[in-house]
Amino acid sequence: MSFPFQGVDFLSFDSLLNEDERMVRETARRFVEDNLIPIIEKHNRESTFPRQLIKPMADLGFFGINLHGYGCAGMSNIEYGLVMQELERGDSGIRSFASVQSSLVMYPIHTFGTEEQKQKWLPALAAGEKLGCFGLTEPNFGSNPGGMLTRARKTADGYILNGEKMWITNGSVADVAVIWAKLEDENNKVRGFLVETNRPGFQAKDVHGKWSLRASVTSGLSLQDVHIPAANLLPATGGLKSPLMCLNQARYGIAWGAIGAAMSCYDTALKYALERKQFRDQPIASHQLIQEKLSWMITEISKAQLLVHHIGKLKDAGKVSFEHISMAKRNNVWMAIECARMARDILGGNGITDDYPIMRHMMNLESVKTYEGTQDIHTLIIGSKITGIPAF
Ligand code: TGC
Ligand code: FAD
């Protein structure tokens, strides 16, 4: 059972939003209420990705939302964040899908691609007619992608790629993979390549048995002598910094998304606590220990909202640093997991079932804590900034 969502706003956060931003959020919220919430528990149980949502999400402009031109919506970073918040209030896996398509596939093509690559891919990706994935992580190189073993070698008319990528969201449903590889002919500099997934030698195999992000596709990729034309190199990529720039876009969206998951848990717990009665026929919300948990949640959610709003404004002004984004991702995902755990506790036995969304959010958030830089890697990124000493 889930309760209709009214929004969570303790500090008049909405007064910081303009009319367009509120309207975008309402559109995303309605989409999630009408299309995602009714089907998500079934998809989560069956571990299937709800493909039927791709077209409606594309029609609402959710892919490449903060990019300009080429069929993209060209919205502000606050609007982008609010959409991610609402999607993740539904499910982290659906937000993941949108993050990868937008921030990890469309953004690199938009930022590092040729005009021809942009014309070919961006309108189709924005319309959801083509899907993409982002291959950075490898079986033995996760937090330390700079150690990657995937290699590209120049040929007369293009490149040959060899390597393995692991934990790749959308891997087996993608039409195009943004693959990061070291180019042997350029002293092993990291470059980005567009690899159509139907090329001989490219294989994607799904990871099964996940207890987290069950409504999202996660795959391992294998590239065995995959030939691509020279025109598939993303020419403006150069060094590890290029994929890390893509991660900033996605991490920013995740920082907003995590608030959505936390809001869902808080809202469910509050409504449940007001209805559920124990001892002297009193709602459990009347007990001080329950109020303490709810107070903690609303305080942390409110602080998290202010953090991402400030960072969104900095991003729009071109003044954000990647360390700012690390702080928001690290704090907000931690906050959301703590909210999920407290909310689960408030629901007692009911909290462990999928009659309520809490346990699903909690399990999803375990992945969100790990991907796009683990909690501890973001701690070290902040530590490196303030001390000047990289401790990785
Ligand atoms: P390091 O020497 O520190 O950095 C190399 C160069 O890059 C610069 N840089 C960044 N630039 C832009 N944005 C960032 N976030 C940047 N971080 C670093 C840095 O200034 C340097 O520039 P330059 O000019 O000096 O060359 O590199 P390192 O090898 O020591 O690694 C640093 C570290 C550990 C922080 C980095 O590798 C890291 O962030 N590791 C975490 C890996 C990660 O997040 N992987 C995510 C894979 S994708 C994914 O998870 C998708 S999940 C699906 C979904 O989103 O839903
Ligand atoms: P490791 O790097 O092995 O880390 C294991 C533990 O060691 C962590 O706690 C970490 O914090 C800690 N650790 C590592 N180094 C240090 C250090 N120097 N100091 C202190 N502690 C350290 N990747 C992609 O490229 N594309 C995707 O689409 C994608 N989607 C994903 C989807 C899911 C569901 C998941 C789970 C992962 C996905 N990833 C993707 C990969 C993700 O980015 C990595 O899992 C993540 O970067 C961590 O790498 P790892 O799993 O290899 O863990």
Image (tube, rainbow, N blue to C red):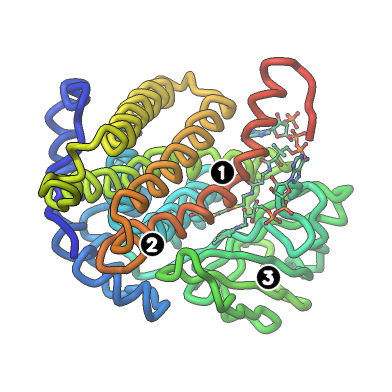
- The answer to whether the residue bearing label 2 lies less than 8 angstroms from the nearest atom of ligand 2 is no
Cα gap from disc 1 to disc 2, whole angstroms: 25 Å
Q: Residue furthest front?
A: 280
Would you name the residue on which mark 3 appears?
228
Q: Where's residue 219, x and y in %?
A: 58, 72
- The answer to whether the residue bearing label 1 lies less than 8 angstroms from the nearest atom of ligand 1 is yes
Mark whose residue sits in front, 3 or 2: 2
Answer yes or no: is residue 361 visible.
Answer: yes
Tell me which amino acid carries mark 3.
Answer: Ile
Answer yes or no: is residue 75 visible.
Answer: no
Tell me which amino acid carries mark 1.
Answer: Leu
Residue at horizontal 59%, vertical 26%? 323
Q: Where's residue 139, x and y in %?
A: 75, 64
Would you name the residue on which mark 2 appears?
360
Answer above or below: position of 181 versus 246.
Answer: below
Q: Residue furthest top?
A: 387
Cα gap from disc 3 to disc 2, whole angstroms: 40 Å
Q: Who comes first in sequence, dot 3 or dot 2?
A: 3
Question: Which quarter of the rendered picture does the C terminus lie within?
Answer: top right
Answer above or below: position of 302 versus 377.
Answer: above
Would you name the residue on which mark 1 appears?
247
Local packing at callout 2 (Cα closer than 10 Å; few below 14, some 14-19, many 20+) is many
Mark whose residue sits in front, 3 or 1: 1
Local SS, label 2: helix
- The quarter of the picture where residue 295 lies is top left
